[in-house]
Amino acid sequence: MEWYLFELCYQNKDLTAGTDFHKELLANSSDAKARAIKVLQEGKRDCNAYLVTLYGKHRGDWKKIVSYQ
């Protein structure tokens, strides 16, 4: 199991940008990529989300894996 960080970018009702972060413990990067797509879909449903970026923990630092729009 590895830690993955999800960064969800969205637009507020007053047209300002917002960003939410959360971490999840997942089996591998392909599971994390599938989860990132679901996070973006949920964000589009709940707020005006336009981008999710997935980061993986690598030697103590967060490294970008992929972004979805």
Image: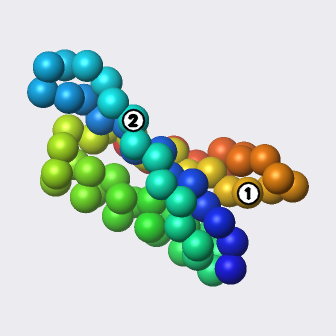
Nearest the viewer among 17 and 36 is: 17
On-image quarter of the N terminus: bottom right
Does residue 13 appear left or right of residue 64 in this picture?
left
SS at badge 2: strand
Q: Could one spot residue 44 in this view of the protein?
A: yes
At horizontal 78% and vertical 47% (from top left) the residue drawn is 61
Q: CA distance from mark 1 to mark 2?
A: 20 Å
Position in image of residue 47 (x %, y %) = 18, 44
SS at badge 1: strand
Does residue 60 appear left or right of residue 56 in this picture?
right
Q: Which residue is mark 2?
A: 19
Residue placed farthest to the right in the image?
59
Mark 1, Cα crowd under 10 Å, few <14 / some 14-19 / many 20+, is: some
User: In the rendered structure, which amino acid carries the disc numbered 1?
Assistant: Lys
60 in relation to 13, above or below: below
Does residue 15 appear left or right of residue 29 in this picture?
left
At horizontal 19% and vertical 19% (from top left) the residue drawn is 15
Which image quarter: residue 17?
A: top left
Mark 2, Cα crowd under 10 Å, few <14 / some 14-19 / many 20+, is: few
Position in image of residue 68 (x %, y %) = 44, 47
User: In the rendered structure, which amino acid carries the disc numbered 2?
Assistant: Thr
> Which label's residue is closer to the chain start, 1 or 2?
2
| Numbered tag placed on residue 5 in the rendering | none
On-image quarter of the C terminus: top left
Q: Which residue is mark 1?
A: 57
Position in image of residue 46 (x %, y %) = 16, 51
44 in relation to 4, above or below: above
At horizontal 53% and vertical 67% (from top left) the residue drawn is 24
Q: Could one spot residue 30 in this view of the protein?
A: no
At horizontal 33% and vertical 53% (from top left) the residue drawn is 40
